[in-house]
Amino acid sequence: MDALNNYLENNKERFLEELMELLAIPSVSADPDFQDDVFDAAEFVKEKLIAAGADNVEVCPTDGFPIVYGEKIIDSALPTVVVYGHYDVQPADPYELWDSPPFDPVIKDGKIYARGACDDKGQMYMHIKAFEALLATNNLPCNVKFMIEGEEEVGSSNLGPFIKENKERLAGDIILISDTSMIANDTPSITTGLRGLAYLEVEVVGPNRDLHSGVYGGAVANPINVLCQMIASLMDENGHITIPGFYDDVVELTTDERENMGRAPFDLAAYKEHLDIKDVKGEKGYTTLERTSIRPTLDVNGMWGGYIGEGAKTVLPSKAKAKISMRLVPNQNDDKITELFTKHFESIAPASVKVKVIPHHGGKPVVTPTDSIAYKAAEKAYSKTFGKTPIPQRSGGSIPIVALFEEVLGLKSLLMGFGLDSDAIHSPNEHYGLFNFYKGIETISAFYGEYAAAAKK
Ligand code: BES
Ligand code: MN
Ligand code: MN
């Protein structure tokens, strides 16, 4: 293993320079203006997989952005790790809130600042570098397959068909993903669950055109007022969602399970201070950690209508819109929840307006095992590199494709995330610690050794 550690140490600077190069490509999958850049990022990943020593590397076209595939099969009798990650990023808006340009990566205070630094370019790239190091030092103990996509941030709609059409090619023993976070740099954790998602847009339409708010105000329903009331009514004073049937399938945790969860370190005062809020808010009867992992939620992500330009315009708008997300927990089904929402939302609309519900993407929640060979191997790897046993922790975020990996490929995922919740993913000034980048590469490399030894067929 000395050779491996030497290799990692001697190539540190280059690893980082390459990541900076990748971060400079604005591969925003949601925005058509960046289409070429998304393709460029796929090419970059392809080149680096080839340089690292992967075989059969291919930029696989889809109806959207491509999936980069590559593999190293050293012996078909050995276990196979399938690495998943994404090279696309969220839009960087609002640009003016960034301290440095989002696609001009800079290193400050031991952190790399750029859109995608943590989610997921920095974390995905650790896998390519761990693979390179293992291969270069003759330490790769099992087979590896890479599947790096470019549409995670927009719902992975083309990855589902891809895995269905490529079951053989993607055959393996475990899916390995670094696209989540851990508790703290001195408190490593492994993500053991992800929430599902139902995302939709609603539209409330009042009069057939914008009206003078003096001439008509008071007599005609204002769609924005109505939408606000409708949305407010979706949650009661206990933070409970009021959509009939919403909680029907929710798996309640046992007292034991909740007590266990409660043992994970969590500092509420620091949490509030970090967010600059005086108090937290959520469903009555649950802790903050529970509210963000084992309980479903409903949030407005954006809302607009009427006049939002400079100064004042007196107008009674014709339309109001909002984007709404619901995070789901086992055993909730996103299609069913979308249906329940739609029915309810239509039923609470007053006769003075028309409403429309437009479903966007969704995904199912997952819980991953902690008694598997892969989890145990990961535990050992973290113990070596962090000097501490990692804590299993369910996350509030979503990676919808993970449920499909299980459904279609029959493979469980291992979520070795090295980000921190404070890394500002999807926000201005996203960053990723150099400590996390390098520790991640080390821990992933160690995982391969532990896993191959334990999983030998
Ligand atoms: N990497 C995140 C998911 C994540 C972040 C999980 C932190 C756990 C901790 C992923 O890229 C993401 O942003 N997912 C979206 C869903 C997707 C359909 C847009 C999400 O969770 O909002
Ligand atoms: Mn991600
Ligand atoms: Mn993301």
Image (cartoon, helix red, strand yellow):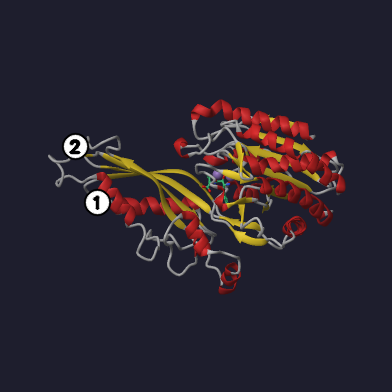
Between 455 and 20, which is closer to the camera in this rendering?
A: 20
Mark 1 or mark 2: whose residue is earlier in sequence: 2
Q: Which residue occupies 36% across, 59% down?
A: 235
Mark 1 to mark 2: distance in Å? Answer: 19 Å
Q: Which residue is mark 1?
A: 350
Q: Which residue occupies 24% across, 39% down?
A: 317
Q: Which residue occupies 61% across, 35% down?
A: 23
Secondary structure beneath disc 1?
loop
Left or right: 373 with respect to 337? right
* 131 w.r.t. 385: above or below: above
Q: Position of residue 71 (x, y in %)?
A: 76, 38
Rendered image: mark on residue 211: 2
Quarter occupied by residue 125: top right
Q: Quadrant of ligand 2?
A: top right
Q: Position of residue 269 (x, y in %)?
A: 50, 63
Q: Position of residue 348 (x, y in %)?
A: 29, 54
Report if residue 132 is visible in the image: yes
Give the residue type at disc 1. Answer: Pro
